[in-house]
Amino acid sequence: MPYKILCIDDIPGEIIGNVSLEDTLKSIFKKNYDVLFEKDPLRAYELIKNDPSIKLVFLDIDFNGDPLGPQIADVLKSINPDLKIIVLTSINRHGEKIRFGKKSNVRKYVIKKELQDDKFKMRVVNLSTALIEDPENKNWMISIDDENETITMENIFTGYKKTVNMPTKARQKSSALLYSCSIRPNEGIKSIEMRGFVDDPSIGADKYVNEIVYDTNAVVREATEWMTWGILDSLGCGTSEVRLIIGKVGSGPNNIIADKKEKEDYAELRRQYDALDKRVLYIETILKAKGILE
């Protein structure tokens, strides 16, 4: 069953650069996923209830009326707790986060106007692919070499492997954070649970963790040509937790499409092979029964 993305936005025709939001999302996800659009939250709820192939929602934060995005996110979680949400916003993401609140099903905040940038579009595709096809990062392994001060990211499914230098400034703190996240990638790590992690609690755990996340991500993003949001995400995933959130690392949507096509081609060839194998066994049985074949 092919997966789908649902965009809940009261103005899908809103112009992003020179193209509408609807055309932008359809364009960047073509050949990967079907993108559905719904202006009415109530109809969106019914779509999600009746269509289990919808795995990701792009949710506008503001609607002309009631309910607003935060309330819609709560309903979506009650309908399908596993459904992931990327929030679409038109203004500064930090202000929107305060209004939106912390929600475990929200994984990213995307400013609409940034969708004009081709590299940003690739990152949205990469992150969306990860949230749909490997939301728990089960295909990823993270190893840390303290002696050489490096991080190695390896995807056991795609064969991708990359070793990058760790940021010296916060190397030990980054190591602690990475170890914790790689052990429990889908649970999320609350900074306040990590004893001894924050040197000075008075500055605020979230602020301190965000600084370390920023340093680590800067290195990872540069190593992956900025095609992903990096290894870690803290408040950017809509909660006060830190969780592993590796996107589809590659050189852009074309690689994603190629990977997907190869998988589809393999599945089709495998189907044909199995069918042919059954046919051969069937003919062999008949020939043996007739004494034609020993």
Image (spheres, rainbow, N blue to C red):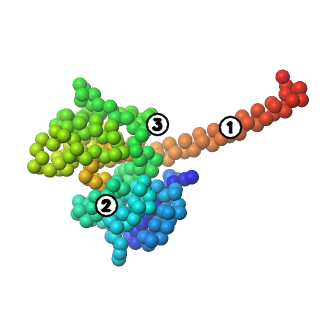
The residue at which mark 3 appears reads as 157
- Residue 227: x %, y % from top left: 36, 46
Distance from the alpha carbon under mark 3 to that under mark 1: 23 Å
Distance from the alpha carbon under mark 3 to that under mark 2: 31 Å
Residue 111 numbered mark, or none: 2
Other-residue count near label 3 (Cα within 10 Å), few / some / many at <14 / 14–19 / ≥20: few
Distance from the alpha carbon under mark 2 to that under mark 1: 47 Å
Quarter-of-image position of residue 274? top right
- Residue 108: x %, y % from top left: 33, 55
- Residue 270: x %, y % from top left: 63, 38
Going from N to C along the chain, the mark reached first, 2 or 1, is 2
- Direction from residue 293 to residue 80 in the image, left or right: left
Q: Which residue is depicted at the point 89% across and 29% down? A: 290
Going from N to C along the chain, the mark reached first, 3 or 1, is 3
Q: Amino acid at mark 2?
A: Ile
Q: Amino acid at mark 3?
A: Phe
What kind of element bears circle 2?
strand
- Residue 2: x %, y % from top left: 54, 53
The residue at which mark 1 appears reads as 274
Which of 3/115 is in front?
Answer: 3
